Image: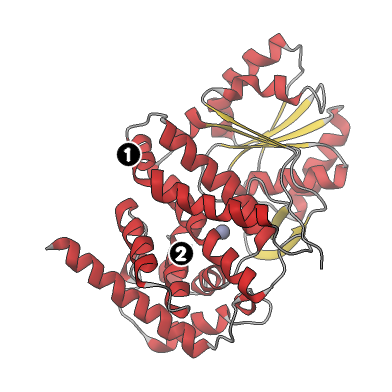
Amino acid sequence: MANIIGSPERYVQGSGVLAELCKHVQSMGKSPFILVSESGKKRVEGSIASGAREYNTKLTFETFRGECSRNEIDRLGSLFKNSGCDVIVGIGGGKIHDTAKAVAHYAKAPIVIVPTIAATDAPCSALSVIYSDEGVFEEYLFLPRNPNMVLVDTDIISKAPARLLVSGMGDALATYFEARACKQSDSGNFIGGKYTVTSMAIARLCYDTLIADGVKALAAVKAGVCTKALENVVEANTYLSGIGFESCGIAAAHAIHNGFTAIAETHHCYHGEKVAIGTLAQLVLENADTEEFAQVMNFCLDVGLPTTLADLGINEIKVPELMKVAELACSPNDTMGNMPFAVTPRMVCDAIIAADALGREYKAKRAK
Ligand SMILES: [Zn+2]
């Protein structure tokens, strides 16, 4: 198996860059088809339009109906075909990005992704998650290429709720540890190859950036301002974590996250919040170095990521329930098999309970 790294052709990030969207899109097309939510349009239309006049670009906006489903992808595909547009732009959160990526893939058109939140590492990836019209998971659509461009206006991100940035940090927190596990087990990545030295270095840089700037970035977003620390963390959440997970692979942390999705009490939690608990449990499974574990735990506590089951909404520990989570996490079509040693549901269940106990201990120490 070859060593393969994938990434968007271009990554643009900065305060106010949305006004330059039309300038950056020039190399791909003259007439963008912009997929956005009703409320999102109100926030972005003005700044995009100012750049459109300068570059003589015709804008076509289309409202997203809320679900990345086959019906929505088909609907948008025929609208795009009849619109005379030549490039697709998806502005908003994960479902809009996934829909826009799928529409562009079937239409063989260039695709630009514009995240307005930094809550996950999905924008840079060559993957769409398809749901039914009712929002039930249906399939992963693996795309042959990453987006042509990802453009992130950090001014917009800094105005989004702080919890979304924190959730993005939770997702990014797992990247290095899952990459390391995949390296140790010599497992494959998401793009049909194995890690490269570059993708491993990117995964490590992702973790180091969170530790260096996470707390400062959170303070900035709480104050609604854009600082260098926030810029760095947005890049870590979006780009470093995106390349890191896709080109290195994932392991226990995300498998445990997927297990938790079966527990109704956790449904109010964001993806990255559950991934944070999955990361702590993975470190327990690996019996990670005490100092390393402490750094991850303290980071979670510093930025307000969940560290206990109660934080996820599970107030009473029921072993049979957690065994269900563990069994799902160990299912053969998930990524637990990328761990460098054999993992049983019993081991996962024990690791979750131990991680929860450690979380409570660290919290108690801080309360003193
Ligand atoms: Zn994730």
Q: Which residue is mark 1?
A: 219
Q: Is residue 220 above or below residue 361?
A: above
Left/right of residue 129 with respect to residue 311 in the rendered view: right
Q: Position of residue 251 (x, y in %)?
A: 59, 71
Given the current orientation, which residue lies at the most extreme left position?
368
The quadrant in which residue 26 appears is top right
Q: Nearer the viewer, mark 2 or mark 1?
A: 1
Q: Mark 1, residues whose alpha carbon is within 10 Å: few (<14), some, or many (≥20)?
A: some
Q: Residue at x 81, y 25 (%)?
A: 27
Residue type highlighted by circle 1: Ala
Q: Is residue 20 above or below residue 339?
A: above
Q: Residue at x 76, y 11 (%)?
A: 56
Q: Is residue 163 visible?
A: no
Q: Is residue 368 above or below residue 344?
A: above
Left/right of residue 20 with respect to residue 259 in the rendered view: right
Q: Is residue 148 visible?
A: yes
Query: Element under label 2?
Result: helix
Given the current orientation, which residue lies at the most extreme top position?
54
Q: Residue at x 48, y 35 (%)?
A: 231
Q: Distance of mark 2 from mark 1, alpha carbons?
A: 22 Å
Q: Residue at x 87, y 32 (%)?
A: 82
**Most foreground residue, 315 or 193:** 193
Q: Which residue is mark 2?
A: 274
